[in-house]
Amino acid sequence: MSEKISDEREEEVINQLTLALGKLRGGMDPRLIPEVGSNLVYALPGAREPGEVAGVEGRIVRLRGSIHPVGDVAFGASDHIARIVLTAMRFDPDMRSAVNIRFSDPLAALIDELSFDICWFDRNQEPPGIRTMDWGVASCCRDHVPDMILDRGAVGKEPMIRILGSDPMSITNTIVMLSSRITNMEI
């Protein structure tokens, strides 16, 4: 691939992620941010390593009742969520974006009611010597890549919901829709 095409693709990924992040800032309920923070990522087509996935440097956190991206959008800014999207891309190369949000039983029930394609994994079943996200995501993607992957956590591991999509705006639209549905809900 020529350097010009590569630069154009990188710029497009950064631009799309930045636009989605702007919409997220205006429409995401901050209660959806987990204690470890969130990250919204978008991979280059054919990405194979975290450096080919753009995300928010330092994650997205809750600050004074709103969501706050800690740093800039950049390639290599996320390892954890980047590995989620890279694993999903092995099963469906078009699933190039992912985000993590807070898990709660009421939120999981709402997601189920809304008929999202979801998959669960149990961290306690993780084989030794394998990274949790590589194993957990792969175990959920064998037949197809679901809309969301959930787990209830484990000792020292926060429960989490991961939303997967083809691009960051589709994921952002899902988060904004969920946010509008949980306004009066205890999560």
Image (tube, rainbow, N blue to C red):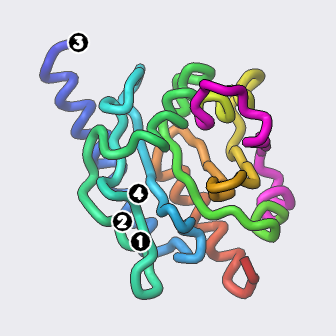
Q: Do the residues labelled 2 and 4 touch (CB within 8 Å)?
A: yes
Q: Residues within 10 Å of mark 3 (few under 14, many from 20)?
A: few
Q: Are marks 2 and 3 in contact (CB under 8 Å)?
A: no
Image x and y of residue 123, in percent: 73, 42
Q: Which amino acid does label 3 sit on?
A: Met
Identity of the residue furthest to the top in this view? 1
Q: Quick check: 122 above or below 2?
A: below
Q: Give the range drawn in magenta.
A: 110-133
Q: In which quarter of the image is the C terminus?
A: bottom right
Q: Quick check: 76 above or below 179?
A: above
Horizontal arrangement in the rendering, residue 134 relative to residue 4 (left or right): right
Q: Quick check: 94 above or below 78?
A: above
For disc 1, the marked residue is: 25
Q: What residue type is labelled 2?
A: Gly
- Could you tell me how far apart the alpha carbons at marks 1 and 2 are, in whole angstroms? 5 Å
Q: Are marks 4 and 1 in contact (CB under 8 Å)?
A: no
Q: How crowded is mark 2: few (under 14 residues within 10 Å), some or many (20 or more)?
A: some
Mark sitting earlier along the chain (3/1): 3
- Could you tell me how far apart the alpha carbons at marks 4 and 1 are, in whole angstroms? 9 Å
- Could you tell me how far apart the alpha carbons at marks 2 and 4 are, in whole angstroms? 5 Å
Q: Are marks 3 and 4 in contact (CB under 8 Å)?
A: no
Disc 1 element: helix
Residue drawn at x 33%, y 58% is 58
For disc 3, the marked residue is: 1
Q: Are marks 1 and 2 in contact (CB under 8 Å)?
A: yes
For disc 4, the marked residue is: 20
For disc 2, the marked residue is: 22
Front residue (pair 112, 131)? 131
